[in-house]
Image (cartoon, coloured by chain):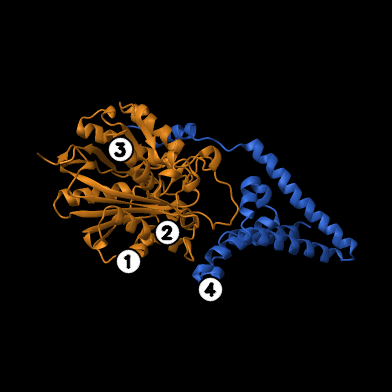
Amino acid sequence: MPKRHGAQTVLFSNPVGITAAASIVGPKEGEGPLAARFDRIIQDPMFGTESWEKAESEFVKTAAEMAAEKARLSMDNLDYIIAGDLLNQSTGSIFGLRETMRPYLGIFGACSAMGEGMSIGGMLIDGGFASNVLCLASSHFCSAEKQFRFPLEFGSQRPPTSTWTVTGAAGVVLNNAASGQAITGCTTGKMIDMGVTDAHNMGAAMAGAAADTIVTHLNDTARKPDYYDLIITGDLGYVGKELLLELTKKQGHNIAANHKDCGIEIFDKDTQDTHSGGSGCACSGVVFASHFLEKMKSGELNKILFIPTGALMSPTTVQQGESIPSIAHAVIIENIQKG
Amino acid sequence: MNMSKKEYGDMVKKASPNSKIVANCIKAFAVGGTICTFGQGLYALCGALGASRDMQGMLVAISLIFLAVLVTGLGKYDDLVKFAGAGAGVPITGFANAVAAPAIEFKKEGYIMGVGAKMFLIAGPVIVYGTLSSMIVGLIYYFVR
């Protein structure tokens, strides 16, 4: 059976198992509605280090160790580590993983990192090139603010369309012997530019990419939205969600009934002052690794389409007046019979 | 998908909530007014204590800058601006915050390339264009007088 279906989708010959997943978050996420779901909540945003960047790397390192431990693997058993974050030159991942001494693939897809990592990891395993792959995604509110916006103590107001970068890291271990939750395929997104130039409205910039990937996926696989218990986007937030539902509907697919967004799930916008919702590479990562994966384990969910979304820009491109191209990578995750 | 950037722009505008302008203006007025009234009080106090007019203005400016930098260091000035917006951002205290905040943030990169180079990251344009416009106004005044 061919693995490639339609324009952008691959379906694996053998399901790729999700052996374990770990989530670690900062204090604000630990006060949110998913607090009880996370493996660890770190109250000190500096995580015992002396800079935001070092703290982010510490989150990455800890998530990697926790994920490997939960999968009952030592670091030496990992054939590849795939990681992505938001910092320049991916330093969040690099400095967190520099002592692992394992083959490392650094990726950049902005906040779509977990989707990109799980797609590549799944393909590596289904292609027979690896047995165990660790996928990581991280972000830190303070290091992201410092790089993309203003120094933390500088007073400014955030517009209602802005999102709050999630502090944390998630690790997902993929394995060639699938049982339980498994990746059965993926739809790799293409860059979509809807002409949005407002860096405070990334949900609007990313909604087009999410809609494109979802519609392409449904067309490639000849599935209907209700094939999935949930279609879960990464960090569109309230504004992006509204636009996504409208865009997919215009293209003949109504996903309103079973759509969720990790950016909406992670914070309580009424009490946590997070405006349009959560964002950052860690947002989709930690919400999937804790909340949704647990729901699959309990059997509440059996088939999900997980679509982390990323806004591909830098402060320089925004200052030069460029619009924000975006991307969304869909990963199919299903409960499969043991055996 | 067939949709022009303009069509999508209109969709985005419809989906994006606006800031609460009236409430924000009231908060800005109250906090900005309080800061300025406090400054005026200080001015009067310095005068009562015998300071000359020039000295009064300088003492008020120094005091407000000191207080704003102190509150920034305590991590509270950004909360005040979040609440009051331009009411806390525009007075001299906001300017002090704009210099102190990057100085704190970039200390990790050292005193030369960090604090020294990044301190005027936000305040720099205000200084550049403030100086430039005062020069232009000065020139106009010189010829029109």
The tag earlier along the polypeptide, 3 or 1, is 1
Q: Which residue is mark 2?
A: A56
Identify the image quadrant of residue A294.
top left
Mark 3 residue type: Met
Q: Which part of the image, by quadrant, shows the C terminus of chain B?
A: bottom right
Same chain check for tags 2 and 1: yes
Residue at x 79% of width, y 64% of height? B59
Residue assigned mark 1: A98
Amino acid type assigned to the residue bearing label 4 in the image:
Ile
Residue topped by disc 3: A296
Element marked by disc 1:
loop
Label 2 to label 1: alpha-carbon separation: 14 Å
Q: Provide the letter of the chain coloured orange.
A: A
Lower sequence index among marks 3 and 2? 2
- Name the subunit of mark 1: A
Q: Residues within 10 Å of mark 1 (few under 14, many from 20)?
A: few
Q: Is residue A94 above or below residue B31?
A: below
> Which residue was labeled with disc 4?
B112
Give the CA separation, mark 3 to mark 2.
28 Å
- Residues at marks 4 and 1, CA–CA distance in whole angstroms: 28 Å
For discs 3 and 1, the disc positioned in front in the rendered view? 3
Task: Tell me which amino acid carries mark 2.
Answer: Glu
Tell me: B21 left or right of A18. right
Labelled pair 4, 1 in contact (Cβ < 8 Å)? no
Front residue of this view, candidates A118 and B126: A118
Q: CA distance from mark 4 to mark 3?
A: 52 Å
From the rendered image, report the letter of the chain displayed in blue. B
Identify the subunit bearing mark 2: A
Q: Residue at x 30, y 38 (%)?
A: A296
Is A333 rendered above or below residue B132? above
